[in-house]
């Protein structure tokens, strides 16, 4: 795409509200020679490393944050990097070990990351047409579905961290939600699609414009030339919280090389070789790169879909890279609105570590190896790989 059309097909990756997560974890360390202070420091460091691992975040020095916490009477501190604050909320000594419980507020904003071991499930739903009348010219009503399938291929081709699927589900109501400026409805749609498709993120798309411009030729004796606009806005949302992670928009106008009455097959390879289809494909490729950039550092996590006694089944499997013998932590998520009205995530890391015993195509079973039962663990809790 040259510099002239770049002004018309400008990719705008706009970050959503700052992604803050409140994570509660616990760490422990053995008390050696009665040195409780040193053991406490090691336990806090262990807990903070768990919090960073779960969020895909990083800081230059875990030790510096730990020192800051302990030197300020165990009160909240500000820190550099992704850790905004850390607070020791409880500690206890059990035999020769100290166990600390911390609460950390983590913001995903650093330039580096440590991607998780498993692939992230991403679902792309058919794109919608904001103005159905625009689809009548050339009968391109299926362009939303065809473009979504193209985007799915482009995203999958650019990343080995994403497991991308395209659902054939009918229109989800994106256009209605946006017309009502109802982000809560959009979030609810994302959460439901996540459950229906076992996905961690979902991509919606809306063609805001597919209008056609006529350019007359000569004395009106010939069929006019046509140029067609496209404007496509993409929305990437988390299916666990329903939060908008980012949105992107591409626009362009290109020659429409079909006559007025031609019924265009938008699924055919020939369509994507024509000027309009080629420009749209180039825009979709830009969008695919943007989606991969947005999810590159996100941690992978599975949702528990069944639990009984000392076993859980979760919605990641062989296709996502799960293997027998993998060790997993169980995380219990919750959400709240802070005093400023900002929607926040809060994660409580349980004390349980489970081991994968069975792996299927898109699911796996893990069990607690030590004696006991998985009490208080329920469907919709998460599992994350042990770092």
Image (spheres, rainbow, N blue to C red):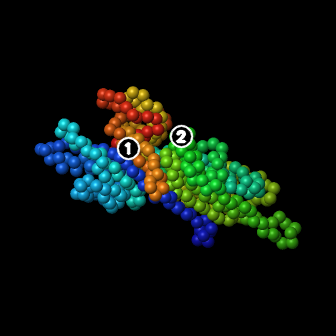
Write down the residue under mark 2. Answer: 195
- Where is residue 386? Give x, y as percent: 34, 42
- Where is residue 45? Give x, y as percent: 27, 50
User: Which residue occupies 49% across, 45% down?
Assistant: 240
Q: Which of marks 1 and 2 is in front?
A: 1
The local secondary structure at tag 2 comes to helix
- Where is residue 198? Give x, y as percent: 52, 40
10 Å neighbourhood of mark 2: few (<14), some, or many (≥20)? some
Q: In this view, does 281 lie to the left or right of 118?
A: right
Residue 348's tag is 1
Q: Quadrant of residue 220?
A: bottom right
User: Which residue occupies 69% across, 63% down?
Assistant: 229
The vertical placement of 218 against 182, above or below, is below
- Where is residue 98? Give x, y as percent: 22, 43
Q: Quadrant of the C terminus?
A: top left
Q: In which quarter of the image is the N terminus?
A: bottom right
Residue 151 vs residue 371, the one in the foreground: 371
């Amino acid at each position: 795409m040259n510099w002239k059309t770049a002004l018309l097909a400008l990719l705008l990756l706009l970050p959503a509200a700052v992604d803050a997560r409140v994570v509660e974890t616990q760490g422990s360390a053995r008390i050696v020679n009665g040195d409780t202070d040193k053991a406490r420091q090691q336990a806090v460091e262990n807990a903070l490393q768990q919090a960073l691992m779960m969020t895909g975040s990083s800081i230059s020095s875990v030790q510096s944050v730990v020192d800051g916490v302990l030197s300020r009477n165990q009160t909240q501190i500000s820190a550099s990097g992704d850790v905004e604050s850390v607070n020791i909320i409880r500690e206890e000594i059990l035999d020769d070990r100290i166990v600390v419980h911390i609460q950390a507020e983590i913001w995903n904003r650093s330039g580096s990351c440590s991607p998780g071991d498993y692939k992230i499930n991403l679902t792309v739903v058919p794109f919608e047409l904001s103005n159905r009348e625009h689809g009548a010219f050339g009968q391109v009503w299926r362009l939303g579905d065809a473009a979504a399938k193209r985007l799915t291929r482009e995203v999958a081709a650019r990343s080995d961290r994403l497991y991308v699927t395209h659902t054939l589900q009918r229109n989800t109501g994106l256009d209605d939600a946006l017309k009502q400026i109802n982000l809560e409805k959009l979030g609810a749609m994302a959460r439901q699609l996540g459950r229906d498709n076992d996905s961690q993120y979902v991509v919606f798309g809306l063609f805001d414009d597919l209008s056609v411009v006529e350019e007359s030729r000569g004395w009106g004796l010939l069929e006019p030339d046509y140029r067609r606009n496209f404007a496509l806005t993409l929305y990437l949302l988390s299916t666990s919280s329903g939060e908008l992670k980012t949105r992107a928009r591409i626009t362009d106008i290109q020659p429409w090389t079909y006559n007025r009455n031609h019924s265009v097959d938008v699924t055919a390879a020939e369509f994507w070789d024509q000027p309009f289809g080629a420009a749209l494909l180039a825009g979709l490729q830009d969008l695919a790169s943007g989606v991969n950039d947005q999810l590159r550092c996100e941690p992978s996590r599975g949702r528990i879909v069944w639990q009984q006694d000392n076993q859980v089944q979760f919605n990641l499997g062989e296709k996502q890279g799960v293997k027998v013998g993998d060790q997993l932590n169980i995380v219990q998520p919750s959400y709240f609105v802070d005093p400023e009205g900002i929607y926040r995530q809060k994660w409580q890391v349980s004390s349980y570590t489970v081991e994968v015993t069975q792996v299927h195509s898109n699911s796996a079973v893990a069990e607690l190896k030590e004696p006991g039962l998985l009490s208080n663990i329920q469907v919709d809790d998460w599992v994350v790989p042990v770092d």
